Image (cartoon, rainbow, N blue to C red):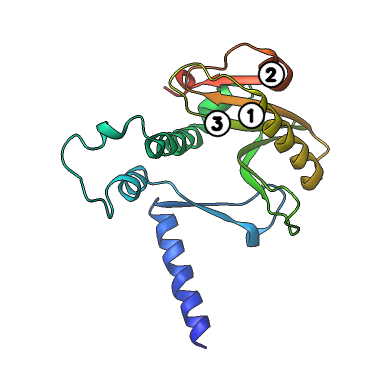
Amino acid sequence: MWSQLRWHAYKKIIEELTQSGFISADLQFNRNQKFTIYRLVDEYTRFYLKFIENKRSIKAGTWLKQINSPSWKSWSGIAFEGICLKHITELKQALNIGAVYTEESPWRFIPKDADEQGVQIDLLIDRQDHCINICEMKFYDDKFTINKKQADELRKKVNLFRKYSGTRKSVFLTAVTTFGVANGMYKTSLIQNEVTMDAFF
């Protein structure tokens, strides 16, 4: 009885946070409501939790002094993903698929075996023309250069998605970056589409 009351209270809080725009409830690709992914999408709340809550120093200029820290880079990447997810209409226009019916969703594979590798995709664009764009969103202060390690991770991500999602659609790896992807052999062999942040504004 107590656990049911707690579950209903928890569910109500989640619904209120979703309706007020603090979090999003995203159905995963080809999965039911049980596999919904909840994400914090309110920009200030995310900033507050990262840089203000429980911090000893919150004086003027403190945040700017952290601009080269790993914490700032991590937050920048997440903030950039949030911007991308709020501009899917513009992203589709940049990909020249604005007139195509699409469904956007995240996708995650959590292995049961510890020896297997998991994967998370923050944005899939599932298209009615039998194609899927896997959007790899990267924040960088210059052109993004794909190194060998990142190339291997991207290949694994696409291969695991094909294997465990069961899709038979054509899959395109799409780079969504601040200033574009630097030319190189990994870009040529991996990236089918490219969109920069300019497309959003």
Q: Mark 2 or 3, which is nearer the eye?
A: 2
Q: Earlier in the sequence, mark 2 or mark 3?
A: 3
- Left or right of 87: which side holds 21? left
180 vs 89, nearest the viewer: 180
Above or below: residue 66 compared with residue 23? above
| Sooner in the amino-acid sequence: mark 1 or mark 3 | 3
Read off the residue under disc 3: 137
Q: Residue furthest top?
A: 183
Q: Are marks 2 and 3 in contact (CB under 8 Å)?
A: no
Task: Pick the residue in front: 108 or 87.
Answer: 108
x and y, in percent, of residue 129 in the image: 75, 30
Write down the residue under mark 2. 186
**Does the image show residue 99?**
no
Q: Which residue is mark 1?
A: 150
Q: Is residue 168 visible?
A: yes
Left or right of 119 in this view: 59: left
Secondary structure of the residue carrying tag 3 is strand
Residue at x-position 69% and y-position 20%: 192
Residue at 52 percent across and 81 percent down: it is 4
